[in-house]
Image (cartoon, coloured by chain):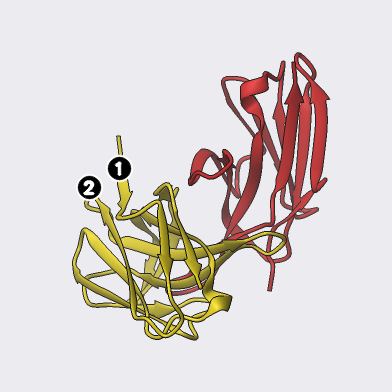
Amino acid sequence: SQQGEEDPQALSIQEGENATMNCSYKTSINNLQWYRQNSGRGLVHLILIRSNEREKHSGRLRVTLDTSKKSSSLLITASRAADTASYFCATDAKNSGYSTLTFGKGTMLLVSP
Amino acid sequence: DVKVTQSSRYLVKRTGEKVFLECVQDMDHENMFWYRQDPGLGLRLIYFSYDVKMKEKGDIPEGYSVSREKKERFSLILESASTNQTSMYLCASSFLAIVNSRGGADTYSNQPQHFGDGTRLSIL
């Protein structure tokens, strides 16, 4: 079953604007991760936030995590055309033994010059 | 920098053929993964491996098998290719972190995955 679900499915903004993407999930997690995928390429890891963290920054990226609502958001500030990509959240469910990341279906971001 | 290399960017095969997709990583990662990505369906896990000669089924293992004879190499095999296996295939690797170890039972945390550039496979 799908653990992480991104919202919106697609987002179109102008350069310089901020972009916000949301992720909701269903079970307890160890961590939540955000990835970017440029068209026709593999995914690139952006940021990992642990379940005991509420906010994390990396350059123009800001990630928040609300474990009570089982949701996370990714904010890209002052977006650029080069930020055009699909963005995925992935959850690391809290299980005993081995488990794997569960990826959402992604938000497609288009940043126009 | 971690490098995950997939043997082909584009591949065209015929139905019924046995197809091998190869993936090599250079960071001594314990975990390796094979996903397929289809429009509207996102990433779906086919198989993963947490150690040499170990393999675990993912969400959609039917029609596929894997091989991990060496730590750095993880191969995906389509035993008899069919048109519904036309897709983008992504390989990834990661470290395995133990977050809790009590009474002989370990709990693991998934660390960031590093992806290859993908193989776009067409089955005709």
Residue farthest to the left, as pictured: B70
User: How far across and how far down the image is residue A41, in percent?
Assistant: 50, 44
Label 1 marks a residue whose chain is B
Say whether residue A5 is left or right of residue B51: right
Q: Look at the image and tell me whether residue A100 can be seen.
A: no
User: How far across and how far down the image is residue A47, in percent?
Assistant: 54, 37
**Residue B69 placement: quadrant:** bottom left
User: How far across and how far down the image is residue A2, in percent?
Assistant: 69, 67
Closest to the observer: B28 or A29?
B28
Viewport quadrant of the C terminus of chain A: top right
Q: What residue would you read off at disc 2?
A: B26
Indicate whether B33 appears above or below B65: above
Indicate whether A69 appears above or below A40: below
Q: Is mark 1 on a helix, strand or loop?
A: loop
Type of the residue with mark 1: Lys
Colour used to depict chain B in the structure image: yellow
Type of the residue with mark 2: Asp
Whether tag 2 and tag 1 are in contact, CB under 8 A, the answer is yes
User: How far across and how far down the image is residue B73, in percent?
Assistant: 23, 62
Say whether residue A102 is left or right of residue A66: left
Closest to the observer: A36 or A110?
A110
Indicate whether A25 appears above or below B83: above
What is the letter of the red chain?
A: A
Looking at the image, is mark 2 or mark 1 earlier in the sequence?
1
Mark 1 Cα shell of 10 Å, populated few (<14), some (14-19), many (≥20): some
Q: What element carries label 2?
A: loop
Which disc is residue B3 wearing? 1
